Image (cartoon, helix red, strand yellow):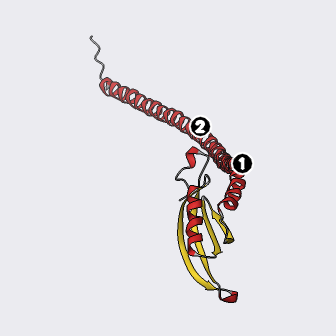
Amino acid sequence: MPQINLLPWREEQRKERQKVFLISVAGAVVVGLGVIAATNFVFSSRIDYQQDRNDLLRGEIKKLDERIKDIDGIEEQKDRLLARMEVIEQLQQSRPEVVHLFDELTRTVPDGVHLDSVTQSGRNVKISGVAQSSTRVSSYMRNVNESGWLENPDLEKIQTVTGGRSRERFSFELSARQKSTDPEATGGDE
């Protein structure tokens, strides 16, 4: 007689498939979580590595900023020293000019004119004095104009002063410009 199996084999087969499906889903979830964890770990380590590099660069940038400040300070000091050297050079060059100026002042003063004060500001020279007559003042101005070291005399003030023994005297102030021996200094200190 033929044997008929009445056992629910289809139901067992379905349970077996369901069991395999659940195991494969659980495996896929575990593998997915592992991939996510590994990816998270890799990206975290890369971020940490980049943060370390950024911190290192920030530290180096701070060091370079300090060096730049030091270099700027050195450059300012260099500029100050160069300016001082230039002033000293100008003083060395103009040193004989002062001697020539005083020599020229004594040569240009005519008889009857007495100088009270001479002040110099840059190339401008202000002269004040007393003369016996106004013609002597104009003679003095001509002498200054013809001088090799002074130019452009300009009479700023002249006034009559009565002195002792009823003699009239003329107090005057004039300005002139000292000529320069340096060709670059022409028109410099106006």
Numbered circle sitting on residue 53: 2
- Are discs 2 and 1 less than 8 Å apart at CB? no
Residue 117 in the image: state x and y as whole percent.
68, 71
- Mark 2 is surrounded, within 10 Å at the Cα level, by few (under 14), some (14 to 19) or many (20 or more) other residues, namely few
Which secondary structure lies at badge 1? helix
Numbered circle sitting on residue 158: none
Q: Residue at x 56, y 71 (%)?
A: 135
Q: Residue at x 58, y 36 (%)?
A: 49
Which secondary structure lies at badge 2? helix
Q: Nearer the viewer, residue 70 or 132?
A: 132
Identify whether 43 is placed above or below 156: above
- The answer to whether residue 91 of the structure is visible from this angle is no
Looking at the rendered structure, the kind of residue marked 1 is: Gln
Residue 93 in the image: state x and y as whole percent.
68, 47
Looking at the rendered structure, the kind of residue marked 2 is: Arg
Q: Residue at x 64, y 43 (%)?
A: 59
| Image quadrant in which you'd find residue 55 | top right
